[in-house]
Amino acid sequence: MAIRMTGMMSGLDTESIIQEMVAAKRTKVDKEKKAQTKLEWKQDAWKELNTKLKNFQQKYLSNMRFSDAYTKKTTKVSNSNAVSVITGANAVNGVQNLEVVQLARNAYLTGESIKDSNGESMNLTALSKLSDIDSSITAGGKLKFTANGETKEIAVDENTTISDVLNKLKEAGLNASFDEKWQRLTISSKESGEKNGFTVEAEGSSGLAALKALGLGTTNKIDVKGQDAIIKLNGSEYQNSKNSFEINGLTITALAANPGEEITITTEQDTDGIYDMVKNFLKEYNELIIEMSKLYNADSTKGYEPLTEDEKASMTDSEIEKWESKIKDSILRRDENLSDVTSGLAGIMSAGVTVNGKTMHLFDFGIDVLSYFEASENERYAYHIDGDPDDGYTMNNDDKLKSMIANDPETVISFFTGLSKNLYAKMTDMSKSVNGYRSFGSFYDDKKMKSDYDDYTTKIRELETKLNAYEDKWYKKFSKMETALAKLQSNASAVTGLLGG
């Protein structure tokens, strides 16, 4: 910044004089900057509101316009210790009888506790040799394990360890372990069911000796069977290798066998689920419509404008925040775009929906706005459900919505499906792309606002350039005046010197 020496000869405060002269033109710059700041705040307010509108459309309307969103069902069982049930969308409503005959089981073989030739307990590990148990085990024997149609075999000799046998069992697709605490070998199939049984065979005297030494038996071949689950549903028998059955939209899992016990399964529409869906939808809608009404009906802030840097310099931070908050809170007051969105949503909500040839409204389901005198100015578009225990206005009214869901869920679903479709279509139309004004998904003229903001930036830059030029012009004029006065004073001094003054 150039250093300007002014007023030295004239004695005038030329700095103050010039600043006073350019003050009027600086006011024009400040005016444009304040207008740009208000536009920026308006953009921010709309961005926040736009996000809430889109979330409402996607979170609720996007799903609720399809009947599948409401077809939630629930199933109750008379003995939850014996069976659990998961209800699918295609499950048929009604009462059914169930009997759990038997559970599915894995094929399971637990060996006897391993003892030495004298019948004494041993202290073996998985690395112990079979010949440590029975010294008669030498080369020439085999153990064969068959599971899932595949056979694995291991040759037995005096160096074969328990670990070698375990590894071969696992290769055959079986679970196998050795419990060192109890000195027992355990073998089981990986899956339950009859088809998942397995066999253990011994060949040769050493093979049979090895089988005996491991506590698995005294015969050359051991057949181990799994077990299928068997249930009877409405008298019809179902058999499966697992304890879960998928039947007519129900996933039934047997937990305990109770042959002869009749268990009742009751499938019905999840009325609470439908009610909660409608209630949550209305809650979100009310919050949105009330907020928009408050923004539109905000108190006037006439006389309040964004602060310049010079104005902020004389205020505290809290004073600045309070001042600016007052403007921001009313930035969408009487906004035409906001009025259109609010009216558009309210219009669809109050309009009828055709169900089975009959036009129905929200009030037919015990849902309505409060009377003009009951509702505050900003809550006149908000809806209340009769009998809602969370609503102080209508909690004592008869709960018509719950009653209709219980007695005629199809009508309720058809109505709210239609209402959601209408709202979704309206919101899509209000947020469609308009060339030069708004982009797709925007409920306000975001493109136009961005263009106007950029125009302000250009205009402010031009005004500041002119202001600086105007200011420089006057500094130059005063500088010339000072120079002239200096020359005049110099000439006067010379004349005085010649005259002997």
Image (cartoon, grey):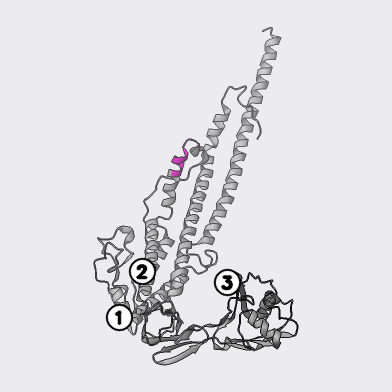
Q: Position of residue 496 (x, y in %)?
A: 67, 11
Q: Tell me the element at label 3.
A: loop
Residue labelled with disc 2: 279
Is 101 magenta? The answer is no
Circle 2 SS class: helix
Percent coordinates x, y for residue 145 in the rendering: 66, 85
Amino acid type, callout 2: Lys
The residue indicated by pointer 1 is 407
**In the figure, 83 relative to 299: above or below?**
below
The residue drawn where x is 39% and y is 92% is 235
**How far apart, in angstroms, are the residues tagged by discs 3 and 1?**
62 Å
Q: Is residue 340 left or right of residue 155?
A: left
Magenta segment range? 313-321
Mark nearer the N terminus (3 vs 1)? 3
Indicate which disc, 2 or 3, sits on the residue closer to the N terminus: 3
| Extreme residue in the right direction | 139
Q: Is residue 462 above or below residue 11?
A: below
Residue 191 location, quadrant: bottom right
